[in-house]
Amino acid sequence: MSEFFEYPFRIIGPTPDTIPMSRLATYMAELARLMGSQDAVHFSRIEDKSVSIVAFASLEEVPLISPRIRSAASGDVNADAAAPWRKLNEFLAEDGWTAEMPLPKSGEVIAFPGKSKTVAILRAVSQPTSVQGRLIRIEGGGEQVRVGLEIDGDLTARISIGSQLAQDLAKHFHRSVRMSGEGRWRREGDGRWNLEHLAATSFEVLEDATLDEALARLREIVPPGSGEEIVRAVDELRSA
């Protein structure tokens, strides 16, 4: 007969008397997905005091299950168990609970902190992107050169450009430029999109005109009388 090892998933907060059965079932379903080896993992019992969902598996399955859980807990978004790991933490965050799971044999305890882990990457997309700012950094010696732009007082250095194009770009150091190319964006758990990297394929030098100069040029471009309302509104904003 095979030797069996237990994986207790201890939810810290509720008790067996306070957790609804339907909610308990959602935790058990995601826990089964997290552990994998679903034909070889079995439910044992619910322990008292805290809600501890105890599952067990044979000795042969432990080298498959424990690394799988450990990989998801380390933040590896490509791990097979990443989705159920995130889901379990989302459930815990919704309920205001945390959880932990001692791994058999190693004695390691995996923490499920709930909300602090739900701010994980949910989606990544690539699309045409442009950013503009003052060119303050060009560095690197390979085929791709790293570029830093000052945008709203902060350094943005998640930009690269081909070395040949970088030679032309360097002529405009400390000038305002617009860089365009393929941007990789990631969506966080709170809904915000962050630009992770821009592989720029072109740039455009922008004129460093003051607001007064821009307003004067606007007055020259707009036909007499037709743009007075626009110019007046901009003047009011400038003096506010």
Image (tube, rainbow, N blue to C red):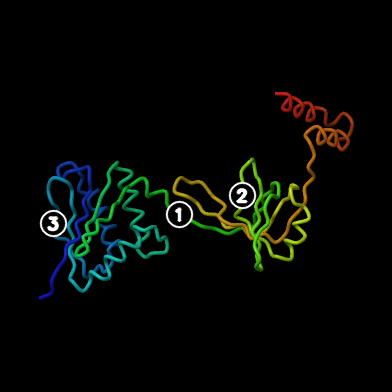
SS for tag 1? loop
SS for tag 2? strand
* Residue 13 position by quadrant: top left
- What's under tag 1, amino acid-wise? Leu
Within 10 Å of disc 2 (Cα), the crowding (few <14, some 14-19, many 20+) is: some
Q: Where is residue 238 in the image (x, y as percent from the top left)?
A: 73, 27
- What's under tag 2, amino acid-wise? Thr
Q: Earlier in the sequence, mark 2 or mark 1?
A: 1
Q: Which residue lies furthest to the left in this view?
A: 1
Q: Position of residue 204 (x, y in %)?
A: 76, 53
Q: Position of residue 14 (x, y in %)?
A: 20, 43
Within 10 Å of disc 3 (Cα), the crowding (few <14, some 14-19, many 20+) is: few
Q: Choose mark 2 or mark 1, whichever is in front.
A: 2
Mark 2 touching mark 1, by CB under 8 A? no
Q: Using the image, determine if residue 38 lies above or below residue 200.
A: below
Quadrant placement of the C terminus: top right
Q: Earlier in the sequence, mark 3 or mark 2?
A: 3
x 47%, y 50%: residue: 188
* Residue 67 position by quadrant: bottom left
**What label does residue 45 carry, if any?**
3
Q: Where is residue 221 in the image (x, y as percent from the top left)?
A: 87, 38
Q: Using the image, determine if residue 156 lies above or below residue 106.
A: above
- What's under tag 3, amino acid-wise? Arg
Residue indicated by mark 2 = 156
Q: Using the image, determine if residue 139 lies above or below residue 177.
A: below
SS for tag 3? strand
Residue indicated by mark 1 = 122
Q: Earlier in the sequence, mark 3 or mark 1?
A: 3
